[in-house]
Amino acid sequence: MNWWQKLWTTEQADTTLREAQYTAAGTMIDQDDADWRPLSGDAKRDLAPMTQRRMQDLAVYLWRTNLLANRLIELPVAYILADGCKLRADDEIVQKQIDAFWHHPVNCMNIKLIKKVRELALYGEQCWPTFVNEFSGAVRLGYLDPGLIETVVVDPDNGEQPIGIVTARNKKGVSKRYRVIVNGSEDELFTQRTQDIRQTFSDGDCFYFCINDLSSSRRGCSDLLSQTDWLDSYDQFMFGELDRVQFLRAFMWDVTLRGATEDDVNKKAKSIRPPKPGSVRVHNDSEEWQAQSPNIAANDTDLTAKLFRNHILGGGTIPEHWFGGAGDVNRATGEDMSGPTFKVMSMRQMLIGHILVEIGRYVLRQWELAHNGMEPDLADPIYHIYVEWPEMVAKDTAKYAAALQQVTMAAASAIQAGLLSQITAIAIIGSIARQLGVGFDAEKELAAILEQGTDAAAGADTGQPESVTLTEAAGVASQATPADPPGDMLGLLGKTAQPAIDTMLVTIRAMLDTADDLPDAMQKLAGLFPEMDDTALAEVLAKALTASYLAGMNDVAEGQ
């Protein structure tokens, strides 16, 4: 009982002391701040307020003074935004409103977006108050320095969702309370209690985004937080090396007087002068002069510097050769080593894209509210907006072009053998085509192919030639030569034979491209169709020539 009484008394005293200190420090948002805490409790996943501000100050200082820290921030920003980006919408009217916001002389997103992304990485969070023209709905973005954020208030029913920003008090003791923008109707997004809380944030609306946070965190963290001490240590190490080099360049003259007394030495010391470069010094054998320099052994300095540097670069997912340490890296290994870096950058690019889309949706909401007086249905396809990004890094198109040819040939062979469906084959080909910057939907592409076949079949009812088989097409091709004009053959076959030869064309075209002459082509075809005899192979080759003419590939027919 004495132990329980002592424990209870201690806990009560500690709790009272903590609450008294917390209230006296002036960090409470309001008298009923305690009622706004999340139902799940406060797990204290954030840095202390003073530590948060010091983290931001140190991040800016290192970015300005530390070469390695500057590259850790600037390289991702350059890869993501060096070629700019565009906020796009399919509807022309919607696009016009987005462009008006984007190019507004105050917003000037082409320039300011780089600063915003850089500071997001430095501070770990960004807060942008908005100013809306109530008549036109035009939106201007402001800026609130993260160092002025005192508290981020979250939804009491959902600790993951910020709902308000409270700034630090100014010299007059006044703070501002901004309501965090969440696109949509308040009634659909929040409970009545949360709506009542949001109504108390009456100094305007703002966007708030943070990175390197947890679901239970309220504030973000800088990209340099975990590396601050290491970056500072690396700087100290490099300055130490500079001092060492200065010492190595220093030397002194050591003069030895043989048989001299102390008085002789003192007299000589007062009169001696170091010789100038190119001067002549004369002395007898009782006097000896030697230039002495320090011997500071530091053979492992380069390895130590590399250890420091790689430790920091590895934490930032930056390859060593991106910071001048090429080592044994060649082009092949360099591309492989850059893979994780581009994945991390792509993840940050996706986050920035989400931020821009949310801003764009807010611009459209304000435009609709100003003109129609009601919240728009953002699920309507007309309000679909997206970010158009350029390629983050130039790709080796020759490599992907060769892969596309091989994959297309293999897919066509698998379809002929009944091992693969057409839609799956198109999807596989599309995965390679996307690496070349050409993306398409496999289902839509297959539907378009089938529609072309249907249109060709319908042409038979309008007086066009009837569909012919590939055997008939081969008969025509066998009587034609590459020099003959393809007009009569096209008149016979028209478009009706095209769907039947599409698959064969892909496979045969790849074979013909690699064949040196006709016998070589026959040999390659024999390997592709081992069950065929010479007569059947000749027929297949004739079909390929026909397909080449129909597709306009006269170079294939004439060359082979």
Image (tube, rainbow, N blue to C red):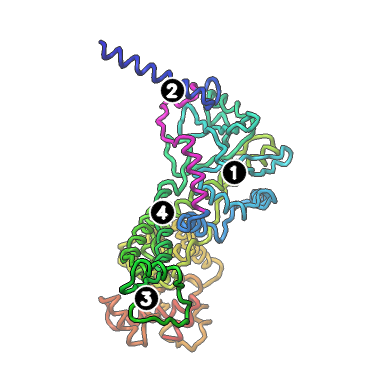
Q: Callout 1, which amino acid?
A: Arg
Which of the marked residues, 1 or 2, is nearer the chain's N terminus? 2
Residue range in magenta is 34-63
Dot in front, 2 or 4: 2
Q: Residue at x 44, y 70 (%)?
A: 396
The verdict on residue 58 being magenta is yes
Judged by depth in the image, the label closer to the viewer, 1 or 3, is: 3
Say which quadrant the C terminus sits in: bottom left
Answer whether residue 411 is visible to the viewer in this image. Answer: no
Depth order, front residue of 548/321: 321
Check disc 4 and report the residue beneath it.
Answer: 316
Residue 213: image quadrant is top left
Tell me which corner region of the image, top left, top right, bottom left or bottom right, holds residue 433. bottom left
Q: Residue furthest right?
A: 135
How packed mark 1 is, by other alpha carbons closer than 10 Å (few <14, some 14-19, many 20 or more), is some
Counting residues from the start of the chain, the first of labels 2 and 3 encountered is 2
Is label 4 in contact with label 1 (beta carbons under 8 Å)?
no
